[in-house]
Image (cartoon, rainbow, N blue to C red):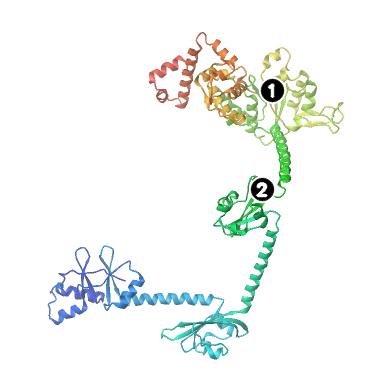
Amino acid sequence: MTPVHRTINKTASLNEAVEIMNETKWNIIPVTDSDGKLEGVFTKSRLFQMVLEEKALTEPIGAYIKKDTVTISHTASYEYLKEIVEKSEVGTGIVVDSDERVIGLLRKTDMVKALLRSSNMLKEQLETILESSQLGVVMTDGEKRIIYVNDKFSSMSKQTKEDLAGQSFPVLFPKVNTNIENSSYVPKVSVGEDQTMLRLSRYKTVTGSKGMIALFQTTTEVEQMAEELQTVKNLKQTLDTAIDSAYDGMLMINTKNKVTMASPPLLDLFNLNREQLLHKSINKVLPQLNLGTVFKSGEAELSDFMEINGIKYIINKIPIKQDGEIIGVLGKVMFRQLNEVSALLKKIEKVENKAAYYQKQLQQSETSRFTWDQIISNDPYVEKLKKSADKAAKGRSTVLIRGESGTGKELFAHAIHSSSVRRDGKFVIVNCAAIPEHLLESEFFGYEDGAFTGARQKGKIGKFDLADGGTLFLDEIGDMSYGLQSKLLRVLQEREFYRVGGTERVHVDVRIIAATNRPLEEMVETGEFREDLYYRLNVISLQIPPLRERKNDILLLTEVLMESLNRMLGSSITGIEEEAQHVLINYDWPGNVRELRNVLERAMTFAENGKIQVEDITEYIVDKVKQAGNGDPSIKMAASAERTAVEKAIFAADGNKTKAARLLGISRSGLYEKLKKYQLQ
């Protein structure tokens, strides 16, 4: 298409038309209305007519416009244009857009140029294909004279293209019958030193005569292909034989989930024949195998035990990949002697579980299991205590953790080790109250061979040896015998000790964390605990408050404990009724968090309504709360619940009084009254 950048209207003068034709060299000018839509054309022949009629240059062209014009849509196809050009006697067509506005001219010269460009492109593409082909190519004209050869044929014949051009094909190949109508095949033709196979075909030349196209392929290439094909056939036969004689069933599907192969044992297992299975959808004939899932996962899968006619079987699904893409799935159905295999697997599983259990026990006994994130609290004092303990963990000093039984002293010890530079070392725990006094020394320091009656032949290393480079946690340090206290003091001071029955000094690098629920100061005064050891242990002291002093943590801990207990008990308790919450909050918890966990475990075991109610809680706790209520326990529970609600709102609002009042649904002044009432300022 020639784009149109200038048009004229009916009132334009002859002079304007002459100027446009002279400038554009067009033989036709589109005449359009004010919207650019076509009204007709002004042709060069009409211009000549006006000149012959001696019209003035200022004369309008309106009376000489040709209105029977040929218009073509800008979306017209090549075939349509070809038909228009062949039938039309008009040399130029007007191209319009979808709104019938003139956008260009289609001239026969434009189409000829486009055809020439297209022909040249096709010619270049064809020559590229022929030159890169492994076939020798020869083309002749209607007189059977060679007009084209490719490089391959030139190389085969040992002649240049220039020498071959114009030669007679029958003279060059006298034994080849060239008098054919369409095509023929010659199995053996000599070209230079090569033996080739020839495919001879006819084609229509430009002049209408029939030329020839000859394709030569060397027999060595064909023989190689035949050998490769035979190799593939042999491999297929070998594979088929292996599959047919396989001990277990085998099945293969393609990307369309169609069965492409099935072994006899598989057909026997499912009582099918090949016709019922081959080329059928696996989802219809054997949907239980579920082989198609491998296309999504891309990984091999092993099914659980399945059963048919009392025979148990399992399926190993294996993806078949080519160039990184899955092109099929192989299903191996194993069902022979699976009872013996199953029994063996159970034995192996038991052994593995036992080994895993002992490994876990060993790891738990020698590594810390808790971090600061697992010590749950909203209490400001506990949060401050965690920060102080975390700072203490970075040093080497001995840490003494104090608090009532069940407050979480061991959790703090684990967390201190986990955040210290010794975190990669061992964390060894010794409960001083649980080991008999006469064995404490050998447990701490170990013993040599024959140190005492009943001792192991090769001796035994102690807890200090095990904790070398790590941390030794001495729980219930207040229950240690007075005699052992002096030996412990020496280790803490000198970092060395003697094994029981030994004479060689053992040097260790151990950090001590001690814990007790006993009043060590009073024990020092009464002579039950060495004063020098007390000061040696009490370098950094951490006092964990009892649960009764941090009531805000009761419900928070309850939520966390219920989650773990649900998993352990297999229960599905979703919460605690409000009255039961009041009981928990107003109980003093002498056993602290440990007691809270035991009470919750008992309540969750007996709960029947999805939530813990008052009747699910141990009676002695409910009775103690009622006795402490001084009359009506429900009044004190209500007050406690109100205090808890205020505390939660303040915490949720991050100290913002206005926001907290809005959460509680009361005024700001009302909130200040409650803060004053419960001394929460």
- The answer to which of 200 and 655 lies nearer the viewer is 200
Crowding near the residue tagged with mark 2, few <14, some 14–19, many ≥20 C-alpha atoms within 10 Å: many
Say what amino acid the circle numbered 2 marks. Tyr
Q: Which of the image's four quarters has the N terminus? A: bottom left
- The answer to which of 59 and 469 lies nearer the viewer is 59
Q: Position of residue 178 (x, y in %)?
A: 52, 87
Asked whether, in this view, residue 21 is left or right of residue 596, the answer is left
Asked whether, in this view, residue 491 is left or right of residue 647, the answer is right
Q: Position of residue 208 (x, y in %)?
A: 41, 85
Q: Check disc 1 and report its element: helix, strand or loop.
A: helix
Residue bearing mark 2:
313
- The answer to which of 143 and 29 lies nearer the viewer is 143
In the rendered view, tell whether residue 539 sits above or below residue 255.
above
Camera sees residue 324? no
Asked whether, in this view, residue 61 is left or right of residue 530, the answer is left
Q: CA distance from mark 1 to mark 2?
A: 64 Å
Give the number of the disc on residue 537.
Answer: 1
